[in-house]
Each structure stands twice: as C-alpha cells, then as structure tokens.
Image (cartoon, helix red, strand yellow):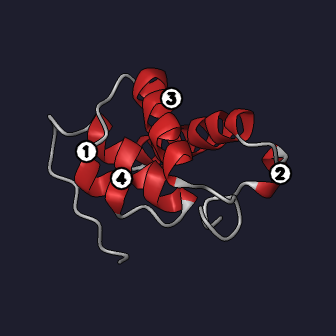
Amino acid sequence: MQSMQAADLEVESQVIKALSEYFPVGRRKIERGSRLVEDLYVDSMSIVEIVMLLNEEFNVELPAAEVAGWKTVDDIVFSVEFSQCAGDDVVERTDL
C-alpha cells in the first residue's frame, strides 16, 4: 500500500511540476485542489497544450472523455494515474 501511495505522490508532484513550468504562476500556488479555470485561468487552447505536454511527459494517451471532465489539478492527476495503469487493474474514481 505504501508503494502505491508513494507512486501517487510521485505522479502528483510530476504533474504539478509540469504545470508550474507551463503556467506563469509560481509552483507553490499550484496544488492538487487548484481549479483550472478559476485559479489557473486555463482556456481551451491551454488544455490542448497541457494534454500534449502530459502525454509526452508521462508517455500516455489521455482519453478525451477524461480531459473533457477536468475541473481541478486533482482531475489531471487522476487521469494520468488512470492512463498509466490502463493495462493493469481497473481504477475506479470514487470521490466524484
């Protein structure tokens, strides 16, 4: 269980690092609960660029259906985690 939590924290920190390099706001302002539109001022063009960045960074293919539902950084982290283990056990999001 600890290794899974460590892996989750690793993905979270990598996603936040990637976003902090993309956005003009400082890294300390981007948190898992940061809202994409309200806090980070993300528009549709930014979403496309973020998806491309994360697909390359994590070597995944983020599903359009997941991306369409993104509201927070937490949603992005979950999508990346889900995409990384898509070939493994099914991951079900229970916090929605």
Question: Is residue 6 shown to the viewer in this render?
Answer: no
For the residue marked with disc 1, what is the amino acid? Pro
Q: Residue furthest bottom?
A: 96
Question: With 25 as the anchor, is 58 left or right in this view?
Answer: left
- The mark that comes first in sequence, 3 or 2, is 2
The image quarter containing residue 24 is top right
Q: In the rendered image, which residue does mark 3 sit on?
A: 53
Left or right: residue 96 compared with residue 19: left
**Circle 1: element type:** loop
**Spatial CA span between label 1 and label 2:** 28 Å
Which residue does the numbered mark 4 point to in the structure image? 67
Q: How far apart are marks 3 and 1 (CA)?
A: 14 Å
Query: Real-space Cα distance between discs 1 and 4?
Result: 6 Å
Q: Name the residue under label 2.
A: 28
Q: In which quarter of the image is the C terminus?
A: bottom left
Measured as percent of width and height from the top left, residue 34 is found at 65, 64
- The kind of residue on which mark 2 rests is Arg
The residues bearing labels 3 and 2 have C-alpha atoms spaced at a distance of 20 Å
- Identify the residue position indicated by label 1 in the image: 63
Cα separation between marks 3 and 4: 13 Å
Label 1–label 4 contact, CB within 8 A: yes
Q: Distance between the residues labelled 4 and 2?
A: 24 Å
For this rendering, which residue is in front, 11 or 15?
A: 15
Residue 66 seen in the current view: yes
Q: Determine the residue positioned at 37% across, 22% down.
A: 59
Residue in view at x 49 percent, y 24 percent: 57
Q: Which amino acid does label 4 sit on?
A: Val
Residue 58 vertical placement versus 68 (above, below) = above
